[in-house]
Amino acid sequence: MQTRNLIAGRWTDIGSGGAIDVADPASGEVIARVPMCGASEALSALNCAFEFQPEWEATPITQRADVLRATAAMVVARKDSLARIITQECGKPLAEAASEVQYSADYFSSAAQEIQALNEMEVSLERPGLRGVVRHRAVGVCAAITPWNFPLAMLARKVAPALAAGCAQLAKPAQETPLSAFALAEILLECGLPPQCLHVLIGDAKAIATTWLMDGRVRKLSFTGSTETGRLLLRQCAPEIVRCSMELGGHAAFIVLQDADIELAVKGAVQSKFRNAGQTCICPNRFLVHESIASEFAARVAVAAAQLKIAPGLDAGCQIGPLIHDAAVEKVRAHVADALARGAKLICGGRTKEIPDRPDRFFEPTVIANCDPSMLCFEEETFGPVIPIMSVASEIQAIEIANSSPFGLAGYVFGGNDASARGVAQQLQCGVIGVNEAAPSNARAPFGGVKYSGYGREGGAWGLMEYVTTQYLALRSLEK
Ligand code: ADP
């Protein structure tokens, strides 16, 4: 397992900021010690990336695409070991980690396909003798800052299109979870990526980001993380007009219409809410269920939730792993306590499950009924396995409440009539919506939000476009 930072083609032990322990959230055990970088290492990486970027951009597209396709294949071939790394550093069940590995590989195959499909275009200028040609160029050196909850996929969805477009990539994964990022970098190098194209380092996040963003040579930032950090980074991007993609916090509504197939909705709720123990930015946080079926929905979700196996992520059959750290547990507790104090009704869960010799981080899947928008859990992301349910009287009320949040990443609508469920979905102010579908994310489709959830899209052709600039040539030919 690689535990060092990758800078300027070298796996290096040098870290001007000391070292940090990477711990398994399910045991608290240290699984690796990684050097912490600061401004000087960030600058070395940038110097190298900047120098090499034109060469990578000039590399034939087929050659770049071949590296990405080989990477996709090798990521899949190493699914088991990559999944174990993900589970060990972020805690999610092994089966979910394996899906994340596949999802990550898909970003590489998709980026390879999209860059080869990105052709020059002719524009009709309607002026004699003048031809309009539109083409695309790499943005330049890019920076990626990623979170811990999908440590492989969040990096893959940035690195793959950046490299496809001909950009050199600087990456700073979350310090909780650098190991899967290093493993991905190893694979890319083995698959023929010139080492100057990719630099992966953790350390003093602020110093690294400032070094990259205020320098003038980084032309693009892609960030996934909290809205608060996103705002801060946007300010840092302003002086040098660094282009940004921001995938920030979510606060998804899960709307269950009166005519919904309840069984499907219950299954969808469990699937979307409890993935990674509720620590995903698209997981539903506000369940808005028609009053005629709200109590049945709550009771059935509670039955399904109670059957989920809570265990360390590496245990066979684990469905709910630990939360990432103690502060996360405290936040979930606070949200549940606040809801109950304001009149909500606990249907199941509401506390941690004790597992001998394990840290107190295994939060039971929790269902709370009689919720309303005054509660904390309706105001901000819980980032834990809690289903807060509010009864609503109409579609209009559900849409109003869903859109009252300043966040707008994902949403879900379950309804028995395709056209009306889609009609409700289209009125939601968010970027990704599952209609009778609990897992809308797909590497070939655009992912991203509106309002406080950010802007820019990742995945498919949309993800690639974030890494290219459009160049228009007005060509007058002098040849006769
Ligand atoms: P989360 O709550 O998911 O940890 P953060 O926004 O704090 O969300 O972290 C997401 C990523 O942003 C991580 O890689 C983290 O190290 C990085 N980060 C946090 N604060 C800063 C900062 N001030 N400047 C640059 N990166 C930061």
Image (cartoon, rainbow, N blue to C red):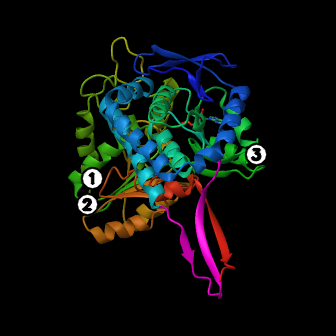
How far is disc 1 from disc 2 in space, using C-alphas?
A: 7 Å
Residue 17 part of the magenta-drawn span: no
The residue that label 1 is drawn on is 265
Residue 260: assigned label: 2
Quadrant assignment, res 475: bottom right
Residue linked to disc 3: 216
Residue 151 pos. (x, y %): 47, 34
Along the viewing direction, whichever of 194 and 268 lies nearer the viewer: 194
- The residues colored magenta run 118-141
- Frontmost of labels 3 and 2 is 3
Residue closer to the observer: 214 or 196? 196
Dot 3 or dot 1: first in sequence order is 3
Q: Secondary structure at mark 3?
A: loop
* Amino acid type, label 2: Ala
Q: Residue at 41% across / 51% down in the picture? A: 110
Q: Is residue 298 visible?
A: yes
Q: Secondary structure at mark 2?
A: loop
Up-down relation of residue 408 to residue 337 (above or below): below
Distance from Cα at disc 3 to Cα at disc 1: 49 Å
- Mark 1, Cα crowd under 10 Å, few <14 / some 14-19 / many 20+, is many
Image label count: 3
Residue 281, numbered label: none
The spot of residue 63 in percent (x, y) is 48, 47
Q: Give the amino acid at mark 3.
A: Gly
